[in-house]
Amino acid sequence: MKDFKFHNPTKVIFGRGKISEIGKELKRDGIKKVLMVAGKGSIKRNGVYEQTIESLKNNGIKWVELWGIMPNPRLSKVYEGIDIAREDDCDAVLAVGGGSVIDAAKGIAAGIPYDGDVWDFYTGGPPSKVHPIYDILTISATGSEMNGNSVVTKDDTLEKKGMHGAPLTNPRASIIDPSVQFSLPKEQTAYGAIDAITHVAEFYFNGSKELNFPDRLCESLIRTIIDNTDVLLDNPEDYDARAELAWSATMALNGMTAVGRGRGDWASHQIEHALSAIYDIAHGAGLAIVLPAVLEFNRDIHRDKIEQFGERVFGAREDADMVLERLRNMYVEWGAPVRLSDVGIPEEDIPKIASNGSIGYPIGHPRKLSREDVEAILRLAL
């Protein structure tokens, strides 16, 4: 096991009815006015907006609102939020939504006190000063509610890049009420689960030798995600399954799965960022296509680990190719695409995808992938 430092400053408030506590958290921290960042309006249909506003009012917190954050959030909305927060003198940013909303909120929080272009933090080093960030989670997928990562797409170049500003860009407090996710469409539940599985896999398949607790933690998280996703696709209002999936998705990228391993691979995410930046497909859908192809391309260095994964997660010791086929078949059963052709992407587009600025070559760990390698991976995903 490698040496490590672990620190996660995010306070998580988890359970039914906990949205009512957001005002208390803001008041306790001396916050007077927040920019509330939200998506297309689902929080008004599921009651989350009403609960949030009531808590703000009850605790004397003023607010202004920014709506319209889309999946695969755009930099232009981050700029808009920065302008609003500055004009209205907001002293914190409150994200109410899923990972895309939280990611946009982090970009806004980093840009408010910065004199330059906030895109600098997505192409260079982390910010040195950030407005406080808080969130109320409505979709479990990205883990952004308990980490310092933010991913946005630059509108003109279609570059999808990440800012890694932990601990400053970690939310100070995150509220997770699993019951507000009862109304999610099945595909959003499935895609969120696939995103969380891939977060774990990026560290699990990083070339590290077998590690007892770190490996078992990753395998347990993935098995828990699978079991509860299976339940939720049949019964979306099973609270216990929602809670198990929500906490597992948070744990998948809050730093715990990296402990003792060193850096992750992240090739699957970088390749998928190019897909979703160009074609605007759901992030989880893109990962269902890319992760098995990356593992297939790297099976010579991951064969033993893939087979261990098959035994401990799928319950059968099989050849690596069979394990990857099981993974793809599971995603198909969940209604996810597993081939580029499933989402209408033709083979002739592969060079364009591999050349997208979202992919900063070389990528991957421990194997460094070139543009030619990425093209080969994408052909495995046809």
Image (cartoon, rainbow, N blue to C red):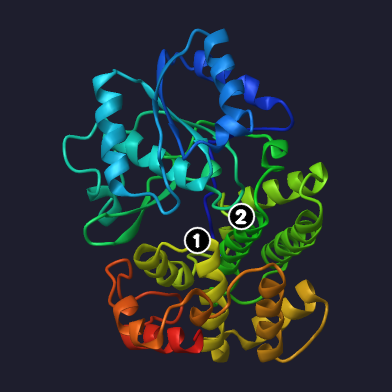
Q: For this rendering, which residue is in front, 197 or 284?
A: 284
Q: Position of residue 242 (x, y in %)?
A: 75, 46
Q: Residue at x 65, y 81 (%)?
A: 305
Mark 2 surroundings: few (<14), some (14-19) or many (≥20) residues within 10 A: some
- Up-down: is 120 above or below 274? above
> Observer-nearest residue: 200 or 88?
88
Q: Residue at x 57, y 8 (%)?
A: 58
Instruction: Pinpoint residue 113: horizontal percent, then vertical percent.
Output: 25, 30
Look at the image and tell me whether residue 229 can be seen.
yes
- Tell which of 313 and 239 is nearer to you: 239
Q: Residue at the spot x=48%, y=17% of the render?
A: 29
Residue 292 x %, y %: 58, 79
Image spot of residue 138 (x, y percent): 60, 40
Which amino acid lies under the numbered mark 2 shown in the image of this protein?
Answer: Gln
Under circle 1, the secondary element is loop
Is there a contact, CB below 8 Å, between mark 2 and mark 1?
Answer: yes
Which residue does the numbered mark 1 point to in the structure image?
282
Q: Work out whether mark 2 precedes mark 1 in sequence or the reverse, and give the earlier one.
A: 2
Give the amino acid type for the residue marked by disc 1 in the picture: Ala
Checking the image for residue 188, the label placed there is 2
Is residue 174 in view?
no
Tell me the quarter of the image containing the N terminus.
bottom right
Q: Residue at x 39, y 81 (%)?
A: 368
Q: Residues within 10 Å of mark 1 (few under 14, many from 20)?
A: some
Disc 2 is placed on an element classified as: helix
Q: Is residue 209 above or below residue 120?
A: below
Image mark count = 2
Q: Quadrant of residue 301?
A: bottom right
Q: In the picture shown, does residue 348 fall above or below 132?
A: below
